[in-house]
Amino acid sequence: MANWPLDLRNSRILISNDDGIHAPGLRVLRDVAEALCDEVWVVAPEAEQSGAGHSLTLRRPLRIHHHDERVFSVDGTPTDCVLLASNEIMAGSPPDLVLSGINRHGNLGEDVTYSGTVAAAMEATILGYPAIALSQVFSNGEDDEVYWTTAASHAGALIARLVAVGWRDNSLINVNFPAVASDQVSGTEITMQGRRKIGDKIHRGEDPSGRAYYWIGAIKTDDALVPGTDFAAVAAGHISVTPIDLEMTDLPSMDRLRGILD
């Protein structure tokens, strides 16, 4: 468990993600981390694992590839990466802080249940390491710009401020940078996880053999801009900071069910 405030300069930072070892957001986050401390480790998936959620690889062996000093990839999920980093690659000298990202898309609302970026931070939290998931929001169009300079400009100072205060052992921090230029960021907002209607449009097609396939359609966010939520914050040009608790027990329902079933 972390001893707050965290001395970043003398810490070991582990970086992972779900976009893969060659992702541009990983390079941005590595630069940010190396400006904060002298010992930065990278353990990321070999290939993109977006949408992998908090999944473990249990039915086949995993392989670790050594790319450079303290830089490794794993042919598995983000959860696999953090677990192997903790128990194998960094065994005996575990990380003081785990950073996951920077994801090439926002992780807002219900995204956190699907996101491999958040899952890496979740696994770190379960293992007892403080963790921050970081994502750069952008539009879905192929020609839309990803404002990596926004995340690059603001992430370091934000991380330093967060670890100077700390958070509960059973929680992680989910950060989303807005899709605006760095100098257009209008502040930082502590937010709650938003909600949105998931798009129900499924596209059906046929492969060259005539067999049907299905493509899950886009999600809808038109009704998501409730004040105080992560969606509303990034839409207003704010950096959204959401503490996420891993305790999922519904305590009010426990009391109600005790009255019925005891």
Image (cartoon, rainbow, N blue to C red):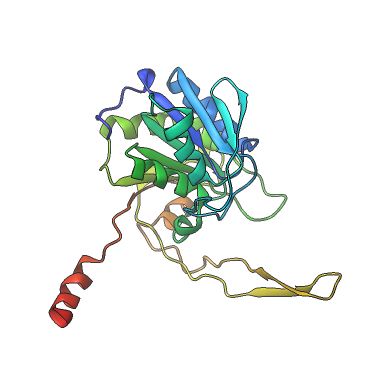
Which quadrant is home to the N terminus?
top left
Is residue 137 in sight in this rendering? yes
- Residue drawn at 48 percent across, 41 percent down: 185
Q: In this view, does 181 lie to the left or right of 249?
A: right
- Residue drawn at 56 percent across, 71 percent down: 199
Report x, y in % for residue 99.
45, 36
Please identify the residue farthest to the right as the structure is shown: 208
Q: In this view, does 186 lie above or below 231?
A: above
Which quadrant is home to the C terminus?
bottom left
Please identify the residue farthest to the bottom as the structure is shown: 260
Q: In this view, does 6 lie above or below 102?
A: above
Number of marks: 0
261 vs 138, nearest the viewer:
261
Report x, y in % for residue 171.
31, 46
Is residue 148 in sight in this rendering? no
- Residue drawn at 60 percent across, 38 percent down: 63
- Residue drawn at 65 percent across, 44 percent down: 47
Report x, y in % for residue 134.
47, 42
80 vs 222, nearest the viewer:
80
